[in-house]
Amino acid sequence: MIVSLCSDAAAISELAASRVADLLRARPTAVLGLPTGRTPIQMYAELVRMHKEEGLDFSQATSFNLDEFVGIGPDHPGSYHAYMAEHLFNHVNLPAQRAHLLDGLASDLDAECDRYEVSIVDAGGLDLQILGIGANGHIGFNEPADGLSARTHRVALLPESREGNAVFFGGRVADVPREALSMGMGTILKARRILLLATGAGKRDAIEAAVRGPVTTRVPASFLQLHPSVEILCDNDAAAGLR
Ligand code: GLP
């Protein structure tokens, strides 16, 4: 596990975008695992800039998003479908049929999770999984619990995770769905490389526990210690517990 300290969120975003761009240039057919949340917004903006100004090409790439809320569709402004369209997909040349997201309106949610797992395998697996981290140490929506799911699954969101997402629902926690579908820990850990982005003092404890703490289901991100190729990009505030 490598921790790269960056001066601020802008520097993290530029470095993260350069990691993606380097991969796409070396391997145009790369399979990307993509996160949502506030943290990666600037990284996506930088990727859009690189596409428009430097010709960064997504035309042969494939993406799989980490998670999606249950019970809302792609047209809902709080959905991760809408987030990805707004921040990346509407602005780059990634073919829509290869930009995969979970369907939170699927009539059979378990079958939808199984379908997603198969799709990732059929695509050749994830070359690079980019992650944010919840203040409670979640990755994707793998919430702290007595046990974690290995595969893509349906999950009940903890109150703090619903609060963290209220910003995407007009600030109204009550409007944030109570459930989500998420890649599992095994799905994430099978990625060939993992890049985790963390900014701000609110992530300090989660980063300290993920990097220094024991591997525990109570801090899902701590399982990243078991992966052979993880880079964590932190600003000073998020890394403060590592000094
Ligand atoms: C969200 C997402 C996570 C994300 C995390 C942090 O709920 N499901 O994938 O990493 O919470 O979000 P933020 O970057 O807004 O702090």
Image: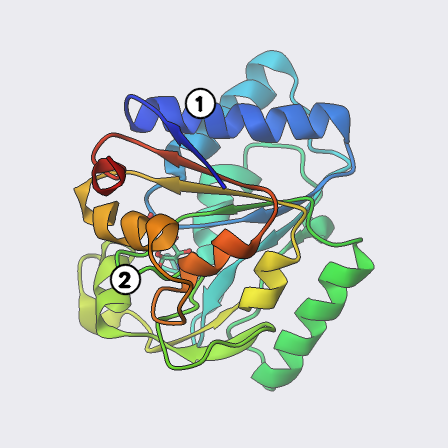
Q: Which residue is under mark 1? A: 14
Task: Pinpoint residue 78: horizontal percent, then vertical percent.
Answer: 36, 59
Q: Which of marks 2 and 1 is nearer the N terminus?
A: 1
Q: Distance between the residues labelled 2 and 1?
A: 26 Å
Q: Is residue 60 above or below residue 47?
A: below
Quadrant holding the C terminus: top left
Task: Pinpoint residue 228: horizontal percent, then vertical percent.
Answer: 61, 47
Give the image quarter of residue 58: top right
Q: Which amino acid type corresponds to the residue marked 1 in the rendered image? A: Glu
- Secondary structure under tag 2 reads loop
Front residue of 18/215: it is 215
The reply to whether residue 219 is in sight is: yes
Front disc: 2 or 1 = 2
Neighbour tally class for label 2: few under 14, some 14-19, many 20 plus, Cα within 10 Å: many
Neighbour tally class for label 1: few under 14, some 14-19, many 20 plus, Cα within 10 Å: some
Position of residue 187 in the picture relative to residue 138 (left or right): right
Colouring mode (rainbow / by chain / secondary structure / one colour): rainbow
Position of residue 191 in the picture relative to residue 16 (left or right): right
Give the image quarter of residue 232: top left
Asked if disc 2 is less than 8 Å from ligand 1, the answer is no
Residue shown at 25% from the left, 39% from the top: 238
Residue shown at 72% from the left, 52% from the top: 97
Task: Pinpoint residue 94: horizontal percent, then vertical percent.
Answer: 67, 39
Query: Which corner quadrant of the figure contains ligand 1?
Result: bottom left
Position of residue 41 in the picture relative to residue 186 (left or right): left
Give the image quarter of residue 116: bottom right
Q: Which residue is under mark 2? A: 136
Q: Which amino acid type corresponds to the residue marked 2 in the rendered image? A: Asn
Task: Pinpoint residue 144: horizontal percent, then vertical percent.
Answer: 35, 71
